[in-house]
Amino acid sequence: MSVNGVTTGTTTTYDAYQTTQSTVTKVEQGATESSVTETGVVYEPSNETTTETVKKTYTQNTELVAKLKAEQANRLQQLQNIVQQLLTKQGQTYNTANDIWKTLASGDFEVDAATKAQAQADIAEDGYWGVEQTSDRIIDFAIALTGGDPDKIEEMREAFKKGYKQAEETWGGELPEISKKTYDAVMEKFDKLAEEAGLTTSEATTN
């Protein structure tokens, strides 16, 4: 046997082996890739908590809350002051019209005819200090201070009551009859506002 023959036979055998190995390798790779591909489509449910079930944490803006409370308290105080001033002035006008404003710091005080006539016109049913116009002004102030927010109606009602009491203290006792009628009129108008807003109304009772 020649060297060339051995070499040729060996080479042929080696090449066949290499070819066989290459084929096996490719088949194994193909099987692996196929396994990977098949495994990739398998869905396994996760035990992790979804974002929908995670509870959110809320932090209160204390600075804003304090500011809003202060503004609300200021509005209530403003209405109380307005009510006190309006009803006190109404009572004074009423007394002037009826000659029962008897004293000032300087002593007795007599009302002249012109002043009395003007006062009587002011407290008339359609007068500036009459029940209707005075109660309307109080309600208008309440609406203006709250921006017409129906949720503030009862707070405004309570502020009105406090303002009425302040007016009584300033007056030194019960206010004149006209002021009591104005109180009732205001309460009725608060009830109407609440009813229009679909809220439960409270009874309008005088102090």
Image: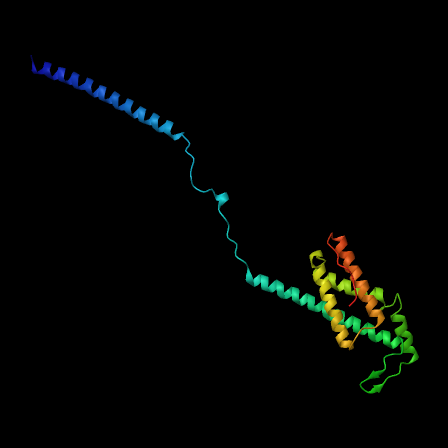
Query: Residue placed farthest to the top in the image?
Result: 1
Colour convention? rainbow
Which quadrant holds residue 86?
A: bottom right
- From the top left corner, tell me how far across and down residue 172 is, in percent: 78, 78
Q: Nearer the viewer, residue 95 or 3?
A: 95
- From the top left corner, tell me how far across and down residue 105 is, in percent: 80, 85
**Which residue is painted at 76% across and 76% down in the image?**
170
Q: In the image, is residue 3 above or below residue 80?
A: above
Which quadrant holds residue 99?
A: bottom right
Query: Residue placed farthest to the right in the image?
Result: 113
Q: Nearer the viewer, residue 201 or 39?
A: 201
Quarter of the image where the C terminus is located = bottom right
Q: In the image, is residue 110 above or below residue 200?
A: below
- From the top left corner, tell me how far across and down residue 73 is, in percent: 65, 66
Quarter of the image where the N terminus is located = top left
Left or right side of 26 for 165: right
- From the top left corner, tell me how far across and down residue 171 is, in percent: 78, 76
Left or right side of 123 for 156: left
**Which residue is painted at 62% across and 66% down in the image?**
70
**Which residue is painted at 85% across and 70% down in the image?**
177
- Looking at the rendered structure, the number of numbered marks drawn on it comes to 0
Q: In the image, is residue 22 above or below residue 66?
A: above
Which quadrant holds residue 188?
A: bottom right
